[in-house]
Amino acid sequence: MEALFTLLSQLGPISEDLKSAISARLQFVNIKRKQTALMQGRVCDHLFFVSKGILRAYYEKDAEEITSWFMMENDFFISVLSFFRRIKSYETIVAMEDCELVYISYDDLMDLYATSLEFNIIGRKLTEYYYCKSEERLLAMRKQTAVERVEFLMQNSPGLIDRVPLKYIASYLGVTRETFSRIRALY
């Protein structure tokens, strides 16, 4: 839990009262490799923080799994549309390794927003950070070549390639496994 508060304090000042309010609402869960954290068709009711491990979000298209993102240590994750709009998720989130997760319910998160200006500032900055990451991914998929996408991934998430099967990384980059292997061999 210390890593969570360290990260939150980098986004803005966090009082002891706010730490206590957050701590009282947090829950913890360990999930095993290949275990599902969220199943497609279910509403995402929790905001998760990854203390240990890596997870993959994917959706299905034409009977193929398309990886939409990865979450590693010190990342937050939700199924965005499902969580904020309170609708069924179009994606599944599964553990790629044994994971230790900290989470808070949607209702508890909304209660903290309603009662704490301090928490609103932190939440806004965190939302901005993930919105920008999403925009970077969208631009990469639209404007970058396959080589540029692989280079970006290797520079910004160097440990990912060693921890995740290549077929999932290739899917995330929008290339075939063979293309990804060929480009990776250049480095």
Image (spheres, rainbow, N blue to C red):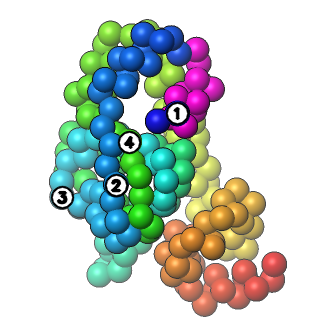
| Main secondary structure of the magenta stretch | helix
The residue at the point 50 percent across, 11 percent down is: 15
Structural distance between the alpha carbons of marks 4 and 2: 9 Å
> CB under 8 Å between callouts 3 and 1?
no
Of the two numbered discs 3 and 4 in the rendering, the one whose residue sits closer to the viewer: 4
Residue that badge 4 annotates: 102
Q: Residues within 10 Å of mark 1 (few under 14, many from 20)?
A: few
Q: Which residues are magenta?
A: 3-13
Per the rendering, the mark at residue 30 is 2
Q: As drawn, is 118 to the left or to the right of 157?
A: left
Structural distance between the alpha carbons of marks 3 and 4: 22 Å
The residue at the point 58 percent across, 23 percent down is: 9
Q: Residues within 10 Å of mark 4 (few under 14, many from 20)?
A: many
The residue tagged with tag 2: helix, strand or loop? Answer: strand
Of the two numbered discs 3 and 1 in the rendering, the one whose residue sits closer to the viewer: 1
Marked residue nearer the N-terminal end (1 or 4): 1
Marked residue nearer the N-terminal end (3 or 4): 3
**Residue 88 painted magenta:** no
Residue type highlighted by circle 3: Gly
- Residue 154 in the image: above or below residue 89: below
Q: Which one is in front, 36 or 151?
A: 36
Quadrant in which the C terminus is drawn: bottom right
The residue at the point 48 percent across, 60 percent down is: 54
